[in-house]
Each structure stands twice: as C-alpha cells, then as structure tokens.
Image (tube, helix red, strand yellow):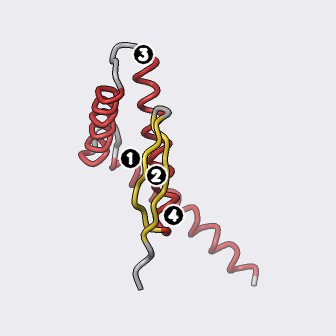
C-alpha cells in the first residue's frame, strides 16, 4: 500500500514553504531542506548575490555542481574508495576467522 502524502512546512532563508511529502520520505526531505538552507545562507552571507530568487538559483547551481562532481567521479576517487573498502573487508574477514577459531 502506498504511503499517505502529507503537506510539510519547511523554512528556507526564513520563508515558509509547504511541500507535499510521503511520511517515509519526511526525514530525507528535512535533511535536504537543512542542506539547501545552509547553502542559501552561505551565499547570502557572502553578500555578492542579492534577492531570495537569485540566491536560490545560485544555491541550486552549487548543489547541482556538487552532485555532478560526485556522479562523474571528480573530487572523489572511486578507485581509492574501492581499495579502502577491500582492505576493510580483508581485516574483517581476518578478525572473523580468529573469532571462529575460539569456538
């Protein structure tokens, strides 16, 4: 059965917006709101962009750039992450093997 859609009030740059959101997605929405509000406040504090609409557009561009950088691997070494995960997996396997010998 599908989750019921509720309306949630969120605050961005001190303004209140009503957003439709399923209950099981509420936490993710609130995290996204906090992140975006932080980005928007950074831009406002820098003082180079005026007006809520322009700040919102600049924040959207910054967030889109971050997303694409991660998706395309720029700024994030996928190979290094895989190597680290492999090393952690090996250490876990060794620790488990030692524990199995105890029983």
Q: Are marks 3 and 2 in contact (CB under 8 Å)?
A: no
Of residue 2 and residue 28, the one placed in the foreground of this image is 2
The crowding category of the residue bearing disc 1, from other C-alpha atoms within 10 Å (few below 14, some 14 to 19, many at least 20), is few
Q: Name the side, left or right, on which 47 lies relative to 91.
A: left
Q: Quadrant of residue 44?
A: top left
- Residue that numbered label 4 is attached to: 89
Which comes sooner in the sequence, label 3 or label 2?
3
The crowding category of the residue bearing disc 2, from other C-alpha atoms within 10 Å (few below 14, some 14 to 19, many at least 20), is few
Of residue 5 and residue 90, the one placed in the foreground of this image is 5
- Residue that numbered label 2 is attached to: 84
Q: Looking at the picture, how far across and down is residue 47, in whole percent?
A: 40, 13
Q: Secondary structure at mark 2?
A: helix
Q: Quadrant of the N terminus?
A: bottom left
Q: Secondary structure at mark 1?
A: helix
Which comes sooner in the sequence, label 2 or label 4?
2
The mark closer to the camera, 4 or 3, is 3
Which comes sooner in the sequence, label 1 or label 3?
3
Q: Are marks 4 and 3 in contact (CB under 8 Å)?
A: no
Alpha carbon distance from label 1 to label 4 = 14 Å
Q: Are marks 2 and 1 in contact (CB under 8 Å)?
A: yes
Q: Quadrant of the C terminus?
A: bottom right
The mark closer to the camera, 3 or 2, is 3
Q: Secondary structure at mark 4?
A: helix
Q: Name the side, left or right, on which 65 lies relative to 12.
A: left
Q: Looking at the picture, how far across and down is residue 43, in whole percent?
A: 40, 23
- Residue that numbered label 3 is attached to: 46
- Residue that numbered label 1 is attached to: 80
Alpha carbon distance from label 4 to label 3 = 43 Å
Q: Looking at the picture, how far across and down is residue 101, in whole percent?
A: 70, 79
The crowding category of the residue bearing disc 3, from other C-alpha atoms within 10 Å (few below 14, some 14 to 19, many at least 20), is few
Which comes sooner in the sequence, label 1 or label 4?
1
């Amino acid at each position: 059965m599908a989750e019921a859609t509720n309306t949630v009030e969120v605050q961005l740059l001190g303004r209140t917006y009503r957003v439709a959101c399923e209950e099981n997605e509420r936490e993710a929405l609130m995290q996204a709101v906090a992140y975006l509000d932080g980005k928007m406040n950074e831009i406002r504090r820098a003082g180079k962009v005026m007006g809520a609409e322009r700040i919102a557009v600049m924040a959207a561009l910054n967030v889109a750039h971050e997303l694409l950088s991660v998706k395309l691997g720029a700024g994030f070494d996928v190979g290094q992450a895989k190597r680290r995960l492999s090393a952690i997996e090996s250490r876990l396997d060794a620790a488990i093997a030692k524990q199995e010998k105890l029983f």
